Amino acid sequence: MSANATSAQHVDDVTIHPAEPDRWDDVVEAFGSNGGCEGCWCMYWRVPSGPEYDRMRGAPARAEFSRLVREGEVPGLLAYHDGHPVGWCAVAPRPAYVRLRSSRTLRPAEPDDTGVWAVPCFYIKNGHRRHGVADQLLAAAVRHAERHGAHTLEAYPTDSEHRRYSSGELHMGTVDLFTRHGFTETERPSPGRVIMRRGLA
């Protein structure tokens, strides 16, 4: 997955909608033929381990993600430009991302706190990156989490000042992106990985 790191040319006519059951075809269009990044289908953080994720990647991941959407879980938000889905932002209660529990660097102190939501990744289609789509998705994710009772929104962005990263490595967003939306650094597990939080009303 790939996030835009800057908002060099802001696109105003972007609309954001939750990925509800009737938008599954739009999810497929947004993720493209590769299912996001190499068949991820946004399941990386939703399975406990790397080996399980490797077995799932591709068609099994698509099937499981389809089940989540079709059963009404709303695992994230879709961005539309000119009526076409062009971007994705995962946002859900943090306990949904079970892989965080086994992460040596990102494991939360209170993994079962459903009042903490997380924004673990973005995917912006080629041709729409660096146009502010990720900014608009993140702003909508803040509102979405707040409306559904979250007291905190957490993220795990890349510090793009640490070194030069490929677009594929920026799928978790950048520190600059989250800073623009009121998030502050709470931990730095490694030079390039930061845990950031924003309190919600």
Image (cartoon, rainbow, N blue to C red):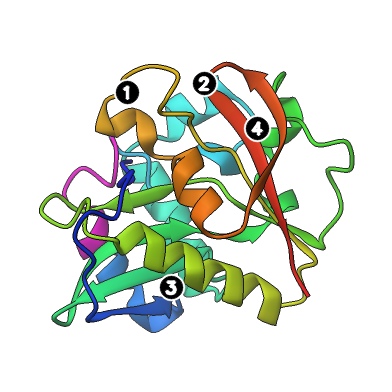
At 49% from the left and 69% from the top, the residue drawn is 139
Gap in angstroms between the C-alphas marked 3 and 2? 30 Å
Q: Which residue is mark 1?
A: 165
**Image quadrant where one finds the N terminus:** top left
Q: Position of residue 129 (x, y in %)?
A: 21, 51
In front of the other: label 2 or label 4?
A: 2
Gap in angstroms between the C-alphas marked 2 and 1? 10 Å
Question: What amino acid type should be assigned to the residue bearing mark 3?
Answer: Ala
Gap in angstroms between the C-alphas marked 1 and 4? 26 Å
Gap in angstroms between the C-alphas marked 3 and 1? 29 Å
Quadrant in the rendering for residue 78: bottom left
Give the class, few, some or many, for how many residues have Cα within 10 Å of label 2's Cα (few <14, many ≥20): some
Question: What amino acid type should be assigned to the residue bearing mark 2?
Answer: Gly
Q: Is residue 42 visible?
A: no
Q: Which mark is residue 48?
A: 4
Q: Which residue is mark 3?
A: 19
In front of the other: label 4 or label 3?
A: 3
